[in-house]
Amino acid sequence: MLGKILFWETQLSADSSIACGSCHSMENGGSDSRSFDPLSVHPGPDGNFGTPDDIRGSIGVQNQSCLGVLSDDPIFGLERQVTRRKSPSAINAMFDGRLFWDGRAGPQFLNPETGAVSIPGNTNPAAGALEAQAVGPIISDAEMGCEVRTWDDVRARLLAAAPLQYANDIPQAMLDTLSQFSDYESLFQMAFGSPEITGERIAFAIATYERTLLADQTPLDQFIAGNPNALSPQQVMGMNLFLNNCLPCHGGPFLADGVFHDIGVRPENEDQGRFGVTGNPGDIGRFKTPPLRNVELRAPYFHNGGKQTLAEVVSFYNGGGDFQNPDGGPGTPPLNLPAGAQANLVLFLEALTDERVRNALPPFDHPTLAIHFRRGDSNRDGSVDISDAIHCLQYLFDGVPALCEDATDMNDDGQLNIADPVRLLGRLFGSGEILPAPTELTRGPDLTFDPLECLD
């Protein structure tokens, strides 16, 4: 239970805004629900937004010191940073010995504070990959951390935190635990027998929770178990196409070979992939095969989030990839399927969804994380300007709905009244004093407790 609490704890991040679950939403197949957000874009290697090499990544933290002092990021300014690759799924990851798209985590796990071997890499194929993966984002200055973040900083934040104080809709089993253990020292005492909070223990706890995230109740599983009606006739035809064309890379119970391939998603020189870990020139542009369970829920697809639908993915494979390999051939062998067969293949891929994942049922149940908003963005158009003051006045006097009460509460006093548009107008045309956090500079959660809400 400690691992589940930590996975959904925004206070594990340097500014209490990002949890592991922010980038690994259960309802989105263990990947990022925010990937289609306009701000979830990294400009890619050319550094320019709106060009073909843009990447649909995951929104992280602002560029900041560990004392909370913000500084302009060369790419994102004072907006939240975005990762250079799309977040892989955290579901069914327990059997994978190398995690991240480039496989840099695992199978060995080193104590993040001492460098000692905590889990040798030769104990089993997966060994300590989950633990090795868990510590990376917490320290990353783009994902959850701050500049030169240390585990002492992480420890201090957890020692000062009331567990899950910014979360809502906490599942009953988690509430039952928190009713008995109201701080992190007591939670670590419960889990480990002593209250010490360490990076190694944080990794052990999160990985233990992730090992419960087994999605193995899909229509395909029911069909294999002997229920002939679990798949439609079209899905059966799609399954046969899959068996004849896709098994070399997507075989086994999780429909992935665990190997790294260059299939022509983007030119090799844009992201060198596995080469960054191994230094082997043959690994340039290679990325790990993703498992296909719950793939329906994980759009957009590929390491760059470059395909928006499964139909686009199947079309990609049907044509042999978007870019040639270094030898001048197709990135992947073309399927050359007619349109109807491609549609059946998509229907089969949709039969790989575990409905417990889609509906966040145990073990995939979880708290609701605070909605990110921009203070002053009353009309939720992404910017803060005179139109927001007008919208606030329309809410106060004409009955226009408040799209986000927290954003409309421009002075953050927990009330919506005439003082709010006055405060914004003062910001725009008067003293210029910045609005309360989360400021108009970037979106974030409301860390003050009041009755106002911001509904997604």
Image (cartoon, helix red, strand yellow):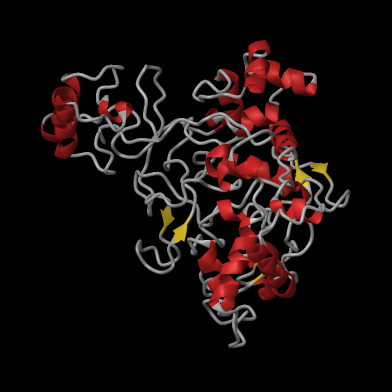
Q: Position of residue 273 (x, y in %)?
A: 61, 65
Q: Position of residue 335 (x, y in %)?
A: 63, 79
Please give the count of numbered marks on the rendered protein: 0
Q: Position of residue 439 (x, y in %)?
A: 31, 33
Q: Is residue 275 left or right of residue 193?
A: left
Q: Is residue 407 left or right of residue 24?
A: left
* Most distant residue in the left direction: 429
* Most distant residue in the top direction: 180
Residue at image coords 58%, 77% = 318
Q: Report the front residue among 307 and 398.
A: 398
Residue at image coords 49%, 53% = 57
Q: Is residue 319 above or below residue 279?
A: below
Residue at image coords 60%, 62% = 347
Q: Quadrant of the C terminus?
A: top left
* Most distant residue in the bottom direction: 328
Image-quadrant location for residue 116: top right
Report if residue 287 is visible in the image: yes
Q: Is residue 95 left or right of residue 424?
A: right
Q: Report the front residue among 192 and 366.
A: 366
Q: Is residue 165 above or below residue 54?
A: above
Image-quadrant location for residue 242: bottom right
Q: Quadrant of the N terminus?
A: top right
Report if residue 268 is visible in the image: no
Residue at image coords 70%, 52% = 219
Q: Report the front residue among 36 and 425.
A: 36
Q: Position of residue 52 (x, y in %)?
A: 41, 69
Q: Is residue 373 above or below residue 316?
A: above
